[in-house]
Image (cartoon, rainbow, N blue to C red):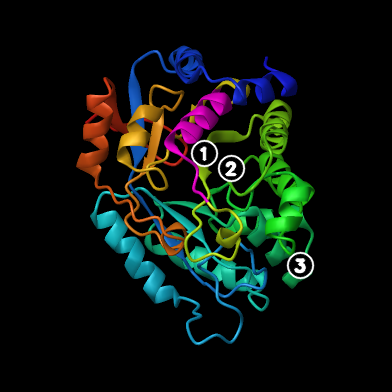
Amino acid sequence: MMNHREACDLFSNDDLIGIGMAADALRRKYHPEGVVTYIIDRNINYTNFCTEYCSFCAFYRPMGHAEGYVLPVDTILEKIQETVDLGGTGVLMQGGLHPELKIEWYEDMLRSIKRQFPKVHMHCFSAPEITNIAEVSGLPLSGTIARLRDAGLDSIPGGGAEILDDAVRHRISRLKCSTKEWVDVHLAAHRLGMRTTATMMFGCGETIEQRVNHLETVRRIQEETGGFTAFIPWSFQRENTSLGRFVKQDATAVEYLKTLAISRLYLENIVNVQSSWVTQGLKTCQLGLRFGGNDVGSIMIEENVVSAAGARNRANEEELRRIIRDAGFLPKQRDTLYRTYFLN
């Protein structure tokens, strides 16, 4: 298994094709059948009110802002119905850190959704949100997750990770949860039998050593629990963000592909690694399928957070299936837990 120093050295290596070939070989070990997956789901942002003021975010609004909102449950149900009508199987729901919404609000929302859509997989609430819900409600972390699970939460996304190195977090999101708090949420969820994903937003001014620190943290959690279904790296989008004034250039396609490939090589204990089209576009996403990626994510019926920061890439199901086929793979629709039971 690759160590920290070897990973850092690999980032400085100019042999992009060689790194990609090594990652592709590991991808084939886990996915010898030549299938690349995607999901039809919807991102629903139930509120944009947030008290954290992260410098990389263009989506949030401070409390009392005229553009702030909390979606009514009826509106959320309408969005889920549209998703189901389009063949969707799940919902990824995230929002700002609202200082007044206690756990009962989230429980009522989840129960309302599950009553009407019992088969829709609810992949919701990042680690910072769950930490916030626990704090606002005066509850322990594990008890908070258990109550959300019992109300209808099926799994937890990896959002809020950014770079799991507190020096970086203090610089770009000093009010958001610490590395330890992010880790604690995922460990608690795994111990309760829930699956989660791990993410990384890179290119926000971190060093290579800090980027590898992030990968090491994720790998250690997976060694302990085996609870991550997938790892999803993407690049920071700078437009409309305060951090963008200091990070002068978006990550290039070369940097993205190298980071994707090294992530695949470093995280040998995670089966699925996603190649992102949202931040890098369809062509780079397609190349990523030969740099260790075995999944292209969602068609994203709705997405508000990354697009607010300048990402304007769009894709429908047929476009995702086309880039998968043209890269030499068989496209299959999956569910949130990476079960590929759709044979079309």
> Which quadrant of the view contains residue 285?
top left
**Which numbered disc flags the more N-terminal residue, 2 or 1?**
2
Q: Residue 312 versus residue 108: which sits nearer the camera?
A: 312
Residue at numbered disc 2: 200
Foreground tag (1 vs 3) = 1
Residue at numbered disc 3: 135
Q: Secondary structure at mark 3?
A: helix
> Which quadrant of the view contains residue 344?
top left
- Identified by mark 3, the residue type is Glu
Where residue 65 sits in the image (x, y, percent)?
Answer: 55, 85
- Identified by mark 1, the residue type is Ile
Q: Secondary structure at mark 2?
A: strand
Q: Residue 293 versus residue 99: which sits nearer the camera?
A: 293
Q: Going 21% across and 33% down the picture, which residue do you hit?
A: 322
Q: Quadrant of the N terminus?
A: top right
- The reply to whether residue 44 is visible in this rendering is yes
| Distance in Å between CA atoms under marks 1 and 3 | 28 Å
Where residue 337 sits in the image (x, y, percent)?
Answer: 47, 37
Residue at numbered disc 1: 232
In the image, which residues are magenta? Answer: 249-264
Mark 3 Cα within 10 Å, few/some/many (few <14, many 20+)? some
